[in-house]
Amino acid sequence: MSEPPATTQRIANVTLDEHTVVRRSADIEHERRVAIFDLLEDNSFAPEGLDAGPYHLHLAIEDNRLAMHINDTNDQSLERVMVPVSPYRRLIKDYFTVCESYFEAIDMGRRALHNEGSDMLREQLADKVRIDDDTARRLFTLLCVLHIRA
């Protein structure tokens, strides 16, 4: 596959389903804000079979799956991509364990888990959406935020 043009094959806006999210700590809320900011600043997002973007992306957990609602910039639905979250459970648990003890943990451990999660997400999306490394990392962070339960 050739690389899509960076100006149109990208996420222009991202929202999270706040109905399934419980109250987040200040650290988690900071991670969410930074991930969204960084994602919107620089990303590559090219859903298979769709015309050039940019896209608005709404992320939710539905039936134990990550639901990626891909909309146009007028928020008209274009596609919904579903990815099972069960393969991420251990990684998410480990990721939050490392994040909770962030100042005591070796940053490499956190990054390794983050890389593993983002690689897995890229693999699962490979035939549905082309994304670059940074986009995958930020989407994995948002998957972790969505996965927080009471």
Image (spheres, grey):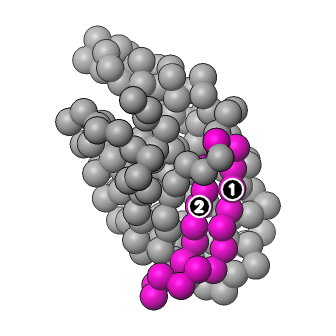
Magenta-colored span = 64-84
Mark 2 and mark 1 lie on one chain; the one further toward the N terminus is: 2
Toward the left, the furthest residue is: 26
Is 7 rendered above or below residue 84?
below
Rate crowding at label 1 as few (under 14), some (14 to 19) or many (20 or more) other CA atoms within 10 Å.
many
Q: Which mark is residue 136?
A: none
Quadrant of the image for the C terminus?
top left
Look at the numbered disc 2 and give the secondary structure of its residue: strand
Residue 103 at x, y = what percent? Answer: 25, 17
Q: Nearer the viewer, residue 98 or 72?
A: 72
Cα gap from disc 2 to disc 1, whole angstroms: 6 Å
Mark 2 residue type? Met
The rendered magenta stretch, by its main secondary structure, is classed as: strand
Determine the secondary structure under disc 1: strand
Which residue has dot 1 on it?
Answer: 82
Q: Do the residues labelled 2 and 1 touch (CB within 8 Å)?
A: yes
- Looking at the rendered structure, the kind of residue marked 1 is Met
Q: Residue at 69% across / 81% down in the picture?
A: 50
**Residue 50 as seen in the image, left or right of residue 29:** right
Position of 139 with respect to 35 (left or right) is: right
Magenta stretch: includes residue 45: no
Residue at left 29%, top 37%?
Answer: 24
Q: Name the residue under label 2.
A: 68
Q: In which quarter of the image is residue 37?
A: bottom left
Which residue lies at the image location 40% right of the left edge and 19% below the top edge?
98
- Residue at position x 74%, y 63% in the image: 128
